[in-house]
Image (cartoon, rainbow, N blue to C red):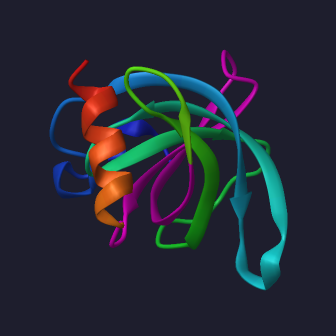
Amino acid sequence: MSSSSVSAADRRQGQRRALRQAAELVLAGNRVLPVRIHDVSLGGMSVIVPVNLPAQTIVRVRTLLPLKPAGRLPAELPCTVQYSVLSSAGGGFQVGMHFGALPEAVRAAIAAHVNS
């Protein structure tokens, strides 16, 4: 799927901020893939994944979110895949996802990162 075929409704709204770090993507059946987070917003995130994932795939992202002024918050983020685009620069597929319901502490950590 090309980025031009992604509808405006499927794109995350709001400010995004780079968050370049390793994470784990948990698929159905608890299959775990190593991924790299590309960016994050209050509504979702983009990751670089070694495989192409279909839209509407339900996944979880395990990561350590940055805490301000210092520290990390372990988090498992429920997500729904919105698009997957081959990224030769990223060395895999750039996958855009919307978040499901997040605990308040996780939302606060993401908000602090995005707004810093």
Instruction: Tell me, yes or no, if residue 85 can be seen here.
Output: no
Q: Looking at the rendering, which quadrant does residue 13 occupy?
A: top left
Quick check: 89 above or below 92?
above
Q: How many marks?
A: 0
Q: Residue at x 64, y 27 (%)?
A: 21
Q: Position of residue 49 (x, y in %)?
A: 71, 43
Q: Which residues are magenta?
A: 74-102
Is 107 positioned to the left or the right of 55 in the image? Answer: left
- In the orientation shown, which residue stands out farthest toward the bottom? 29
| Magenta run includes residue 108 | no
Q: Nearer the viewer, residue 88 or 29?
A: 29
| Magenta run includes residue 86 | yes
**Main secondary-structure element of the magenta-colored stretch:** strand
Q: Position of residue 80 (x, y in %)?
A: 45, 67
Q: Position of residue 1 (x, y in %)?
A: 51, 48
Q: Looking at the rendering, which quadrant does residue 99 occupy?
A: bottom left
Is 39 positioned to the left or the right of 75 in the image? Answer: left
Q: Residue at x 36, y 50 (%)?
A: 44
- In the orientation shown, which residue stands out farthest toward the front? 70
Q: Position of residue 33 (x, y in %)?
A: 81, 54
Instruction: Tell me, yes or no, if residue 90 can be seen here.
Output: yes
Q: Residue at x 27, y 32 (%)?
A: 112
Q: Quadrant of the C terminus?
A: top left
Quick check: 35 above or below 54?
above
Q: Residue at x 30, y 52 (%)?
A: 107
